[in-house]
Image: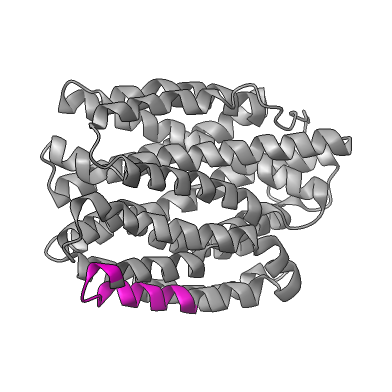
């Protein structure tokens, strides 16, 4: 592929990551509003998040089946259109039943998009032959930052206007994604070394456990645990994303310079420190600082995980066969995303039903599991 086409595809995939982050964070930073609108308790909200996570896993399985047939680019375009359709239904739902149904549909779409954007990203990283996954995930974070800032700026505006988010996914439908390479080879075979992939997947679980706890329970934590002003609860998400985005944008160079093992181990210690600040925060500004430190610590775990899984799975195959196998493995690997999301969103809420401080203590301890797992990322 020519360098110009490769650059255009890289920009297109970065835009898809950005849009996914923008829509997801736009919705999660308004969870307290949806909770108030439909009078949801912490347990009911946890069950809603559980359903979202499980259906996102279903979406990832669908992506594994469909991507080899139609290509990840076509599947991404169709999923962006579906996202544009379900988001306004969730926001403008006339009843709680319609709201639940729309959130369920969004969960499936979320899983498909998560899988196919990472398929595109690892294929591009293989073409570039150098680390570029952190900057792709940095684009996701940039989208989340914009969404979080928008939530802060419109805290007093009626929730209905969020339905306008539907136009954002449509902006990337016609983008020049990396073309599908057809191959007669099986997508996944016995030659895939699953054991090292599972170790890398365990690290991805730990990351999403922390990440989803911050997104889904951070605003509620500021609202209920440390009495932050209601129009500032999105500050749980904004500094987390700001620190995460800066580290991810610098992550390509950090990994080339210091290697993934050292970067991950230092990050795990920083994340544990940030979570400790959140758990023991005496006031909401201190808790906000904790979310900032936490975001910097775990920033590059996800991109390095997908990159490592693709490298391990690819082997020495011709490009078309390699991409077919890696696409299928990445779709399965993305399931670790939702295991971590399940722990982060549901366990934090259920364990912290009496006190969210206790809920956030769970990821504070478990994130240290990245220390021994980091060696699985060694090239």
Give the camera-side residue of 226 and 154.
154
Work out which quarter of the rendered image holds the C terminus and state it.
Answer: bottom right
Q: Name the spot of residue 274 as percent of width and height, x first.
A: 39, 74
Residue 1 left/right relative to 187: right
> What residue is drawn where x is 44% and y is 72%?
271
Question: Is the magenta region chiefly helix, strand or loop?
Answer: helix
> What residue is drawn where x is 63% and y is 64%?
196
Q: Name the spot of residue 205 as percent of width and height, x first.
A: 46, 60
Residue 60: tell me if it is visible: no
> What residue is drawn where x is 65% and y is 63%?
251
Above or below, 181 relative to 46 = above
Above or below, 99 relative to 269 = above
Above or below, 83 relative to 346 = above
Give the camera-side residue of 29 and 85.
29
Q: Indicate whether residue 303 is drawn in magenta.
A: no
Residue 299 left/right relative to 356: right
Above or below, 86 relative to 144 = above
Q: Name the spot of residue 199 as percent of width and height, x first.
A: 56, 65
Q: Quadrant of residue 308?
A: bottom right
Work out which quarter of the rendered image holds the N terminus and state it.
Answer: top right
Q: Indicate whether residue 274 is drawn in magenta.
A: yes
Which range of residues does the magenta coloring cover? 269-285
> What residue is drawn where x is 62% and y is 60%?
304
Give the camera-side residue of 258 and 234.
234
């Amino acid at each position: 592929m020519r360098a110009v086409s490769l650059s255009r595809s890289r920009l297109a995939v970065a835009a898809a990551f950005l849009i996914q982050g923008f829509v997801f964070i736009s919705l999660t930073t308004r969870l307290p509003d949806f909770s108030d609108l439909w009078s949801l308790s912490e347990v009911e909200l946890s069950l809603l998040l559980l359903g979202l996570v499980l259906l996102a896993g279903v979406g990832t399985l669908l992506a594994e089946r469909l991507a080899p047939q139609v290509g990840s680019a076509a599947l991404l375009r169709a999923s962006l259109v579906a996202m544009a359709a379900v988001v306004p239904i969730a926001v403008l739902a006339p009843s709680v039943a319609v709201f639940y149904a729309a959130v369920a549909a969004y969960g499936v779409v979320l899983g498909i998009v998560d899988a196919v954007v990472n398929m595109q990203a690892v294929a591009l990283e293989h073409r570039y032959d150098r680390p570029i996954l952190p900057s792709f995930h940095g684009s996701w974070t940039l989208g989340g930052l914009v969404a979080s800032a928008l939530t802060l700026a419109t805290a007093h505006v009626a929730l209905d206007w969020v339905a306008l988010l539907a136009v954002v996914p449509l902006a990337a439908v016609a983008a020049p994604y990396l073309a599908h390479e057809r191959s007669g080879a099986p997508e996944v075979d016995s030659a895939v070394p699953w054991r090292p992939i599972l170790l890398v997947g365990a690290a991805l679980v730990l990351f999403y456990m922390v990440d989803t706890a911050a997104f889904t329970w951070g605003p509620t934590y500021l609202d209920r645990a440390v009495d932050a002003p209601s129009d500032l609860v999105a500050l749980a998400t904004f500094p987390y994303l700001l620190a995460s985005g800066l580290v991810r944008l610098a992550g390509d160079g950090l990994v080339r310079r210091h290697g993934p093992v050292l970067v991950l181990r230092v990050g795990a210690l920083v994340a544990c420190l940030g979570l400790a600040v959140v758990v023991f925060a005496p006031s909401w500004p201190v808790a906000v600082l904790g979310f900032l430190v936490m975001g910097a610590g775990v920033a590059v775990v996800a991109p390095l995980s997908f990159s490592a899984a693709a490298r391990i799975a690819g082997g020495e195959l011709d490009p078309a066969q390699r991409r077919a196998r890696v696409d299928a493995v990445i779709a399965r690997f993305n399931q670790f995303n939702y295991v971590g999301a399940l722990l982060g969103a549901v366990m934090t809420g259920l364990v912290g039903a009496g006190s969210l401080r206790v809920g956030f203590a769970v990821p504070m301890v478990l994130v240290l599991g990245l220390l021994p797992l980091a060696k699985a990322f060694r090239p």
